[in-house]
Image: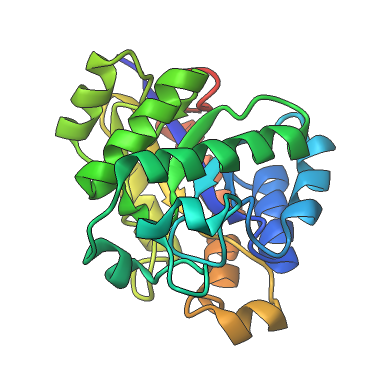
Amino acid sequence: MARLLIVNADDFGRSEGTDNGIMRAHREGIVTSTTFMTNAPSAQHAASLARASPSLDVGVHLVLTYGRPLSNPARIRSLVREDGSFWRPSELLARPIDRTEALAEYRAQYGRARELIGREPTHVDTHHWVHDHPALSWAVCELAQETGAAARTHTPTQRDEYRAKGVRTPDHFSREFQHPGHIGLDDLLALIARLEEGVTEVMCHPGEPDPDLVATSAYARERPLELAVLIDPRIRGALERDHITPTTFADL
């Protein structure tokens, strides 16, 4: 059985530096897909890049832990603070979550992505990977069923649950390529060498230097380091040597 690899860049739309880094990682490196934050400051900028780049597979990075919702906050009270903003991840996951409210907001973000990029998003995942939570996993799976989008799944159990409902997913998912100490060239080469048969999604967070992102994100300084590795020709060489085929969610 062949080994195929989706390299998905999260946070498209988070900032112009993030958007530009993702595009460079796609053009010059091994990124094959991205997921779009439609409630983020650079959403319009990201959308313009996506419309001009049909080779980039674009999905939706469903957000409940950053910024403000696209829905009326009064209709999703379990998901927002009194001022209508989203909770931080630890705060959200410690609270009772109404899964139908999550689905309503996810629908709004998916619809906004489709409107902005001018085509159907190919897949869905969540910002801060919150769909380990049962209510949010249900909402992601429901959205994928409704739209026909593929979905990121974090574990074999979750993968099998989604597939039982007719949702397309990769066979494997890796979140190893993140955080200092794990985003060097040798780290990614080792990850590639360990890929299993079937389709694997590797998550990443490339970006170019961005003062606005440095001021608002704890992961701003690591993004250019990831980008440098993702475009290093030795990475593409490793894929070719090991007969690993780049692919996308659209091709699942």
Which residue sits furthest bottom?
Answer: 215
* Depth check, front residue: 180 or 71: 71
Image quadrant in which the C terminus is located: top left
User: In the rendered image, is residue 32 in sight?
Assistant: no
Which residue sits furthest left?
Answer: 157
User: In the rendered image, is residue 5 in sight?
Assistant: yes
Determine the residue positioned at 34% across, 74% down: 181
Q: Position of residue 250 (x, y in %)?
A: 55, 21
Q: Position of residue 234 (x, y in %)?
A: 53, 51
Q: How many marks?
A: 0
Figure check: 204 above or below 250: below
Figure check: 1 above or below 70: above
* Depth check, front residue: 170 or 102: 102
Determine the residue positioned at 18% across, 32% down: 156
Image quadrant in which the N terminus is located: top left
Determine the residue positioned at 67% across, 40% down: 112
Using residue 173 as the reference point, say whether residue 217 is left or right of it.
right
Using residue 28 as the reference point, say whether residue 206 is left or right of it.
left
Q: Coloured how?
A: rainbow
Figure check: 232 above or below 85: above
* Depth check, front residue: 217 or 26: 217
Figure check: 114 above or below 129: above
Q: Position of residue 138 (x, y in %)?
A: 28, 35
Using residue 243 as the reference point, say whether residue 19 is left or right of it.
right
Determine the residue positioned at 28% across, 70% down: 90
Q: Position of residue 10 (x, y in %)?
A: 52, 52
